[in-house]
Amino acid sequence: MATKSLHKRESDLANSNRQLEILSNGIFQNGELPTFKSKISETNQFPLKAKKLEILQINVGYMCNQVCEHCHVDAGPDRKEIMTRETMQQCLDVIKTTGAHTLDLTGGAPEMNPNFRWFVEEAAKAGIKDFIVRSNLTIIRANKKYYDLPEFFKKHNVHVVSSMPHWTRGKTDKQRGDGVFDKSIKALQELNAIGYGMPDSSLRLDLVYNPSGAFLPGDQASMEKDFKKALKEDFNIQFHNLFAITNLPISRFLDYLIASENYEDYMYSLVEAYNPAAVGNVMCTNTLSVSWDGYLFDCDFNQMLELPVNSKVKHISEYNEALLEGRHIVISQHCYGCTAGAGSSCQGVVA
Amino acid sequence: MQKTYYDPADLKKFGKISEWNQELGDKFFEYYGKVFEEGALTAREKSLIALAVSHTEQCPYCIDAYTKDGLQRGITKEEMMEALHVGAAIKSGATLVHGVQMMNKVNKLEM
């Protein structure tokens, strides 16, 4: 189990240019596999264009209490990139005027940003329809100062979306670290106790499943059924929906794929599972990702690859929804991750 | 010509068998796809049966394919190994139950 980020380890792969090189060389350069651009061109879907903005996703910092093996953010306790209150204020100005219906806070562990609660309180006042916080669950049990997070989420009607790679301890801890499973279970029970995730409750609790290895997620609906049955029987836990998300071949997951000699097979699996119907609904077409320092990206993955939006508007301080609509999405081979099978997004399948 | 009987890369070429007989190839893959659809048995249960049979058939391609398929469906290592033991039990049982034939024969021939 990794305990340090690639950045801390000064790994070659901490460099986003190196990742992009790997994704463009080898099997994609010699024509063994088609590039994403040529693949979507087959169905006249190139260039991929942004539609009307629906989801504003804000990454409030890369600091995290966990160091998950597959993390595309390369997050961890040693990452110091944290959104300042000033940038948060700029985001709030946008939230108050945006036509987007969903605000999605992510990280790292977003709760570790010292201004997190202030930001949530202010953002909740803006009255956006769906207000998501992506919580890793263990943060709730990590320190006394976080114990009241469930109540805090409830007070502001925050929609909690949490990662849970499996309903068994072994598979969960292998991916996310020793003890993560037990703490996650405890956190879920606490959320249930105040009404989160209960049938018909307006306090939304969804789980995110992503595979713990070099394989694609199975059918989202069947996985949801299995998760629900096991968590209910074993721990009396309930939740609303399961989002099955494909691991994209970037950052720590790319590092793992290469080290385990699974990279080429994994890229083959992604390309073989390519679904043109998913392309029309990939999340970059209705989402905008804001980095900890306020820059704009087509998605959280492009943010980590440091591929900025293809628009005159580059920063949240100069935000202009009309200018951003219709922009050409920046793509590379990692995009195959969002078009495999039923497709993948932060909200689960798309096709 | 390759120097080994099995090459993992050949699994990806499975579909090519239709090239030399389109009609039967198509019928086979249509049938195959239908078999694994959710029915009276779940697709998950079928995946575990396929994994066990892959081993009793000792088909390396099938073992690769259904191990990965199982992982994708969230099937655990413990479930996989139990399924294998079902296959192994039938294999050994099938060997040993013939022991009755042996015993019958011995009893018939011996004075």
Image: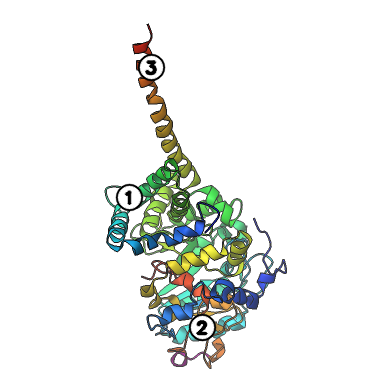
Q: Amino acid at mark 3?
A: Met
Q: Which residue is mark 1?
A: B42
Q: CA distance from mark 1 to mark 3?
A: 41 Å
Q: Are marks 2 and 3 in contact (CB under 8 Å)?
A: no
How crowded is the residue under tag 2: few (<14 C-alpha within 10 Å), some, or many (20+)?
Answer: some
Q: Main secondary structure of the magenta part?
A: helix
Front residue (pair A264, A327): A264
**Residue A272: horizontal and vertical position, in percent?**
44, 67
Q: Residue at x 53, y 93 (%)?
A: A312
Can the viewer see residue B90? yes
Q: Tell me if residue A322 is in the magenta stretch.
A: yes
The span picked out in magenta is: A319-323
Placement of the C terminus of chain A among the 4 image quadrants: bottom left
Front residue (pair A105, A271): A271
On residue A330, the disc is 2
**Residue B84: horizontal and vertical position, in percent?**
45, 40
Front residue (pair A181, A333): A333
Q: CA distance from mark 2 to mark 3?
A: 74 Å
Local secondary structure at mark 1? loop
Q: Is residue B24 left or right of residue A57?
A: left
Q: In this rendering, is residue A115 above or below B56?
A: below
Q: Amino acid at mark 2?
A: Val
Q: Which residue is mark 3?
A: B103
Q: In this rendering, is residue A120 above or below B50?
A: below
Placement of the N terminus of chain A among the 4 image quadrants: bottom right
